[in-house]
Structure formats: C-alpha cells, structure tokens
Image (tube, helix red, strand yellow):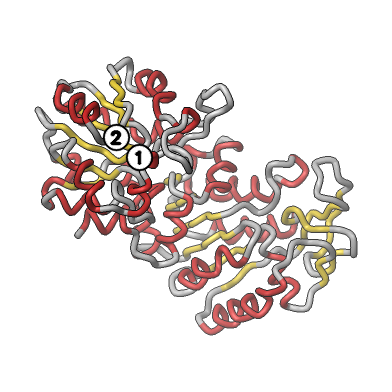
C-alpha cells in the first residue's frame, strides 16, 4: 500500500499542491476540467478519513499581481460540484491574515481553496520565506501536481523543507503518474516502442536520445519527420523542416543503428497544396513530395507499418501526434496510432500517453479509457523522459 493510501488523515489539515491551471473562456467558465477531476480522488480520501483540505494552485501566468482573469475564485462552484456538494471555502490570498484565519477555522470534511499562488512573484522564484509562510497553513504537505513537477517553485518543491519526511507525500494522481513513468522508463517489458510526433525535432532531441538507451523501436511522425527525410536526401516540398537540425537528425539515425534500435519514419504522407482544412490533398512518398505541396499527415502505408510495430509491442509510450489531427483531412494517421495502441493495450501491453497534443487526440477520438495511463503533465512528462530529475518528485522522495 502506498504512503498516501496507508495514512489516516483524521483530524489533520492536508495542504495539497494541485494543478488547477485550467482554461477559462471570456465569461470565466471552465472549458476543460480534466486537471480538476484528476485531483478529486486525493481530496475525497482525506475528507472521507475525517480530515480537512487546503488547496493551493496557480492559474495562468499573471504578470502584475492579482487580476480578475486569473483568480481561482472562478473555480469554487465547479469544484464543489465535482466533490459532490462539499463546502468549498475561499481565501482571497494564499498567505496573510485571511488565509491563516480561514485555515485555522476549517472543520473536518471542508475544503479551503487559496487564491492564485502566482499573484506573488516569490512562488516562481522558489522563495524560501514565501514557502515557509505557505507551510504554516497545514499539518502536512501533499504534492499532487505532476503538471508542475518540473518546476522548483515555492509550493511545488521548496516547501518540503518545512515538513519532516513522514509529513510530506504524493497524492494519488502524482503516485499514478510517477509509477507509470517509472514503469515505462525503468521497468519496460520488451519490445518497447516510443511514438514521437509533433512539429519540431529540437523539442524532442533529448527525449529521443534518452529513449535510444531503452526502446527497441522509435516511430517518428508529425512535422519533425520531414527534417529526417530531408537529412537523408529526400525531397519534402514545402513541408516543415528545421534546416539547422539536419545534422542532428543524421546523428540520431546513426546512434540508433549503433544501438540496434529500429527507427521508423513514415514511408508515405498525406500531402496538401496549402495549410488549410479545405486544401487539395494527395498521397506521396514522404521523400518525394512535389514542390508547393506539404506533408500534413502520415500516409496509409506508414499507418499500416506503424500499426504492425505497435501491435507487436509490450510497452508503448506516445508523445505527439502524427499530423495536423485538428483538421479532419489530416487526422487519419493519428487516429490509426490511437487505434493500434488501444488494441495492443487490450492484448496486454502497457501504454502511457502524455504530452498535450497526444492527450487531446486520445480524448478527441474517445480512446482515453482504452490505454493504460494518460498523463496530465506535458512539460513535466517530457523532462522526466529526457532523464532529468524533477524537483517536485525529488522534494517528496528526499
């Protein structure tokens, strides 16, 4: 049993760092509440034990202190609904008199939401004095914000210094994230395929290099595939290409050969005469795209080959789409990958999907419950798979 699950929170005030950085429209309505939903099991366990919960989070990137647009008060009603009508109190500051008074009065079974941490510049600076002020609000500290685990901010890491080891722990969400990521990176069953997509090679160099030490197969799709195609001497028309990364692409291909890792590039592409949902389309070999045309999705041959590789795998990591899946004409490749991962998972493979666009894709296609784990942290997951130590994880484990 995990540390969190084994702990009895009766009569205790749990100070939880959550990631409630959710998108709001111009009427301050939440347009995607996935991050809030993800924190609910942790909150409910504490309340059911007879404890009380004090939540701290950031929202957006406020530049000039308190702003209506970035106030967490817009989340109170929805949070109460997600918790089945539980009373959610609000402090219009995250430190200071009102926060301390409300935290002092809170009763078992109640929740207190503090105002946006980033209204204070000290939060992102990892200020020790600010972290200590936050620490005084609760009896123990729980980090349940994987989305900000790669930041050494006051509430995500520095605050740990003010709690003894037995009074700092991961929440259920963070435990799941860490266990899934560790399973893929350190305990993967072979064959292990990593599917890396997205626009830029430069964003994914470190993750690919780290995966060359662990994966048996790496599938490369999305805009970044065309940098590899051009590096190998292919003609890519007007497709996306990072000219300054051609040598890097060749180095990656050479390293993969030396380490006996199979790199799979898309044999063919769905091409378009402009970047537009209503563009004219055709299918062409990915290394023979006519001038004036651009690759916006993997083609049917590539989708078939990638599907076979995925279905043979026992461990699957998916980070980044195969094409511009937001446009209907260019979503077949990403959908094919999602279907293959779902089928492999059903046959016993362990699949982890992470990185904003891949998560959006599995949700859009209705596959979120057909994979083993969907990560809530984009940047955090990327840095974890690059082999970096995440401050938010180290702070709990040290």
Q: In which quarter of the image is residue 365?
A: top right
Q: Name the residue under label 1.
A: 117
Label 2 SS: loop
Looking at this rendering, what residue extends furthest in the top direction?
85
Q: Which of 153 and 10 is in front in this view?
A: 153
Residue at 39%, 24% in the rendered image: 73
SS for dot 1: helix
Residue 218 coordinates in the image, percent (x, y):
56, 66
Direction from residue 135 to residue 11 in the image, left or right: left
Q: Which of 130 and 249 is in front in this view?
A: 130
Q: How crowded is mark 2: few (under 14 residues within 10 Å), some or many (20 or more)?
A: many
Q: In which quarter of the image is the N terminus?
A: top left
Badge 1 density bin: few <14, some 14–19, many ≥20, Cα 10 Å: many
Q: Is residue 395 left or right of residue 122?
A: left
Q: At 55% across and 64% down in the image, what residue appears?
A: 204
Point 24% across, 53% down: residue: 128
The quadrant where residue 232 appears: bottom right
Determine contact: label 2, label 1, CB under 8 Å. yes
């Amino acid at each position: 049993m995990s540390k969190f699950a084994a702990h009895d929170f009766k009569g205790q005030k749990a100070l939880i760092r959550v990631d409630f950085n959710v998108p709001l429209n111009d009427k301050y309505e939440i347009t995607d509440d996935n991050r809030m939903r993800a924190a609910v099991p942790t909150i409910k366990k504490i309340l059911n034990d007879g404890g009380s919960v004090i939540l701290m989070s950031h929202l957006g990137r406020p530049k000039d202190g308190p702003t209506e647009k970035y106030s967490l008060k817009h989340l109170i009603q929805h949070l109460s609904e997600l918790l089945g009508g539980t009373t959610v109190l609000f402090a219009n500051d995250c430190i200071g008199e009102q926060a301390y008074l409300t935290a002092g009065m809170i009763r078992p079974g109640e929740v207190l939401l503090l105002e946006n941490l980033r209204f204070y510049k000290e939060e992102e600076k990892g200020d020790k004095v600010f972290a200590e002020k936050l620490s005084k609000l609760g009896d123990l500290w729980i980090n349940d914000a994987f989305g900000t685990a790669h930041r050494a901010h006051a509430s995500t890491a520095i605050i740990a210094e003010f709690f003894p080891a037995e009074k700092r722990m991961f929440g259920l969400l963070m435990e799941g994230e860490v266990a899934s990521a560790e399973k893929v990176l350190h305990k993967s069953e072979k064959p292990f395929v990593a599917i890396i997509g997205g626009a830029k090679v430069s964003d994914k160099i470190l993750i690919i290099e780290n995966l060359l030490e662990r994966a048996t197969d790496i599938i490369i799709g999305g805009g970044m595939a065309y940098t590899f195609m051009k590096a190998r001497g292919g003609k890519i028309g007007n497709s996306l290409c990072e000219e300054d990364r051609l040598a890097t692409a060749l180095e990656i291909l050479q390293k993969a050969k030396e380490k006996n890792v199979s790199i799979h590039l898309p044999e063919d592409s769905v091409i378009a005469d402009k970047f537009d949902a209503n563009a004219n389309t055709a299918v062409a070999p990915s290394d023979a795209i006519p001038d004036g045309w651009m690759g916006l999705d993997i083609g049917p041959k590539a989708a078939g080959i990638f599907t076979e590789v995925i279905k043979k795998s026992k461990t699957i990591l998916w980070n980044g789409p195969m094409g511009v899946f937001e446009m209907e004409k260019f979503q077949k490749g990403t959908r094919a990958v999602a279907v293959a991962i779902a089928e492999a998972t059903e046959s016993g493979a362990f699949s982890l999907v992470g990185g904003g666009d891949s998560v959006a894709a599995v949700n859009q296609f209705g596959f979120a419950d057909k994979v083993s784990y969907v990560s809530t942290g984009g940047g955090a997951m990327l840095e974890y798979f690059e082999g970096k130590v995440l401050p938010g994880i180290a702070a709990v484990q040290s």
